[in-house]
Amino acid sequence: GCPHNCTFCYITSLSNKERRWQAEDVNKTVDHLMHVIDLYSPDYISIIDDDFFVNIKRGKAFFEEVERRDIKIKWGLRGVRIDEILRMDDSILQLLERVGMQHLNIGVESGSPRMLELIDKSINPAEVVVANRKLSNYNLQPLYNFFSGLPTEREEDLKYSTQLTNKLLSENPRAQISGFHQFTPYPANPL
């Protein structure tokens, strides 16, 4: 689940009960992970989540348990928000490096303040730049997600996105843009 109200996301078309964020016990989650590792011996696992760091303490506890159990694999993590990166301290980002985090997929969506407001993203382009600079101090690769085709989007909004992507790439040599995806409306969500 996810507690955010991004108007483009499928989650906003679900009932409050269906979209409620629920956390499994960290040890139980890592036990499941160990089961997968025992069965398949992967050297890389990608966690795909709506928002992995809703509770940053829980996210940290998960990777502390991974480190405590000496799980040696590489990681990818989809479902990270700019505001969460801004709230993370050095200990969390250093922990992610130590456990083998390779990349973080981060939803930026647009460089246009107007579009970010329309989609109720609760971030602004200046915060994106600050988070990117913060991540540039670590051996973590941010993969930024953007999309276009939102209702009322104009050429100037796309230019803002292009300018922001250029800034992110120029200020952090590990940063990548995962692509400009096409907005797709989901039935019953606000857009």
Image (spheres, grey):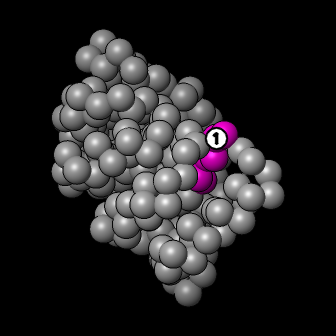
Quick check: 33 above or below 18? above
Report the span colored magenta. Answer: 43-48
Q: What secondary structure characterizes most of the magenta part?
A: strand
* Secondary structure at numbered mark 1: strand
Q: Image point 70% across, 55% down: which residue? A: 37
Asked if the magenta segment contains residue 46, the reply would be: yes
Q: Which of 63 and 80 is in front in this view?
A: 63
x, y (%) of residue 17? 56, 87
Q: Residue 73, how many percent across, how many down?
A: 58, 43
Task: Looking at the picture, tell me which residue is in the foreground, 107 or 37.
Answer: 37
Residue bearing the label numbered 1: 44
Give the residue type that dot 1 points to: Tyr
> Does residue 117 appear in this view?
no
Can you give x and y, in whole percent of width and height, for residue 62 in the image?
44, 64
Closer to the camera in the image, 168 or 142 = 142
On screen, residue 67 versus residue 24, left or right, reads left
Which residue is depicted at the point 42% across and 60% down? 68
